[in-house]
Amino acid sequence: MPTLHWIGKDKVINHHLDVSFKVLEHAYGFDNGKQIEEETKSGNKIIHGDNLEALKALLPEYEGRIKCIYIDPPYNTGNEGWVYNDNVNDPKIKKWLGKVVGKEFEDLSRHDKWLCMMYPRLKLLQKLLSNDGVILISIDDNEQANLKLICDEIFGGGNFVTDLIWRSADSSNNDAKQFSVDYNHTLIYSKALSWQPNKLDRTEENNLHYKNPDNDPNGPWFSGNISSPNPRPNLTFDIISPNGTIIKPPKNGWRWKKERIDEMIERGEIIYSEDETRIIKKTYLKDQSGIVPSNIWWDVEETGHNRNAKYELIKIFNELKTSEIFKTPKPIKFIDKILKIATDRDSIILDSFAGSGTTAHAILNLNKQDNGNRKFIIVEMEDYVEAVTSERIKRAINGFGEGNKKTKGTGGSFDFYELGQPMFLEDGNLNELVGVEKIRQYVYYTEIKTPLTTSKYKDNKHFLGKHNDTAFYFHYEQDEVTTLDHAFLATMKTKAGQYVIYADNCLLTKDFMTKHNIIFKKIPRDITRF
């Protein structure tokens, strides 16, 4: 498989493993239309901070659980005229590149910088995606080819689903120097080869092809395919019509055996044309549950466009200034269609380049429409996250506008988080400021890659959980040295085939631990970094 090489790749290819793990600090909740101090625990999250660190912080709770990821990263157009710098010259990104890539950073082209920025983020997104999940990435021609190659490398070329073409402009730009750019790409990758998009609802236009010229009691029908999709030499028999006309097989042969076709003729599912020179398979409208989505979304009335999305922001905030921050926002209709093909009513959806918050807004709208329970996690590093991203979601929940033009709120709730303290200090010791419970959650995740879901102990307070007949204990106290000895063993109540016990010291003999299937792990030396 072709791979892409660029200056700095060797520094970032495994950088996701070196990213400092930071905890999420709850800032406030928003519930029943009001801001509160307590966590709503709704599952909806807005996170402010570097999305690389935020994605790492999500792993203990969400690795392998995200059903749909949609991101609209910087397109790297070279445009520096607005706050969300598209040429990856944001001071935070430049500082990060200088630290990770080193002196080579000075030689990087803007394409090198963009690839260095994207690669570790995509690696973490791949970890978060569920086995039945799908990721959709919007991009334009500046980086589409590069993005395709690194996604093939990270997600697997065989998991490439399609390049969705979306008409992002409602009219051609006559001021363009060469060609008017009327569309964007959205690359789609699945975690599993067997992934299938949901079918879309049928429209009146789809149904216009179905007629009922013979008053079939089964209702309107359409002429279906009777040819085999692949050459079938054994299905190349002739069919004799009632008046004796010989009907020759299609080029690839018939789709079914002669006995099956005779039965379908008998039931009226296959009929002869009026001149009896061909047969017609009836495909009934009543049997059609939906339509397979196309990879060209050209109807701006159906999916919206960038200018349409700016009008949405103006309507929400009742001012032009907010829409000027985002030159090419995504319209709700576009995200809504993505959600319909890629999620179910209980999916968790992640957007790590949240921008104005369109993804979360679209999720709230769709939940309201179908009484769904989808959850959103959105991440934004810029400082407008409070004034725009979070505020938009609040207004979506409560309703916005005035008088007859007021849009009714969707209802719902969310929690707002800031990136907090790192789990480990620079000297390698645990950072006790993050709190014991978050440390416990981290350690449990490193052992079995699933979240620690309860703080209720049926055992002693150091018990983490039991998995695959192994019981895990984290014998830890702040400002106190802990010891694994016979006195601690006496407090353990869980029966298991094996025991993994973390502590500062161990006084048990190796023979004793071997005999009783005990594995000692020293704090902090043996705590895995991921």
Image (cartoon, rainbow, N blue to C red):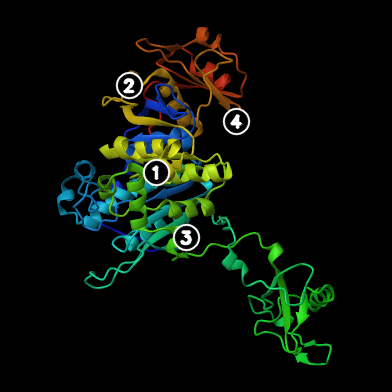
Mark 1 surroundings: few (<14), some (14-19) or many (≥20) residues within 10 A: many
Q: Position of residue 280 (x, y in %)?
A: 72, 79
- Secondary structure of residue under mark 1: helix
Residue type (three-letter) at the residue carrying disc 2: Asn
As drawn, 530 above or below 498: below
Nearer to us in this view, 46 or 486:
46
Which image quadrant: the N terminus? Answer: bottom left
* Residue underneath mark 2: 431
Residue type (three-letter) at the residue carrying disc 4: Asn
Mark 2 surroundings: few (<14), some (14-19) or many (≥20) residues within 10 A: some
Q: Are marks 3 and 4 in contact (CB under 8 Å)?
A: no
As drawn, 181 above or below 464: below
Which image quadrant: the C terminus? Answer: top left
- Secondary structure of residue under mark 3: helix
**In terms of image quadrants, where is residue 425?**
top left
* Residue underneath mark 4: 468
Nearer to us in this view, 41 or 505:
41
Mark 1 or mark 3, which is nearer to you? 3
Disc on res. 302: 3
Mark 3 surroundings: few (<14), some (14-19) or many (≥20) residues within 10 A: few
Q: Earlier in the sequence, mark 3 or mark 4?
A: 3
Taking the image as drawn, is residue 306 in sight? yes
Q: Position of residue 401 (x, y in %)?
A: 39, 42
The residue depicted at 65 percent of the width and 59 percent of the height is 289
Q: Earlier in the sequence, mark 1 or mark 3?
A: 1
* Residue underneath mark 1: 124
As drawn, 383 above or below 441: below
Residue type (three-letter) at the residue carrying disc 1: Leu
Residue type (three-letter) at the residue carrying disc 3: Glu
- Secondary structure of residue under mark 2: loop
The residue depicted at 32 percent of the width and 21 percent of the height is 431
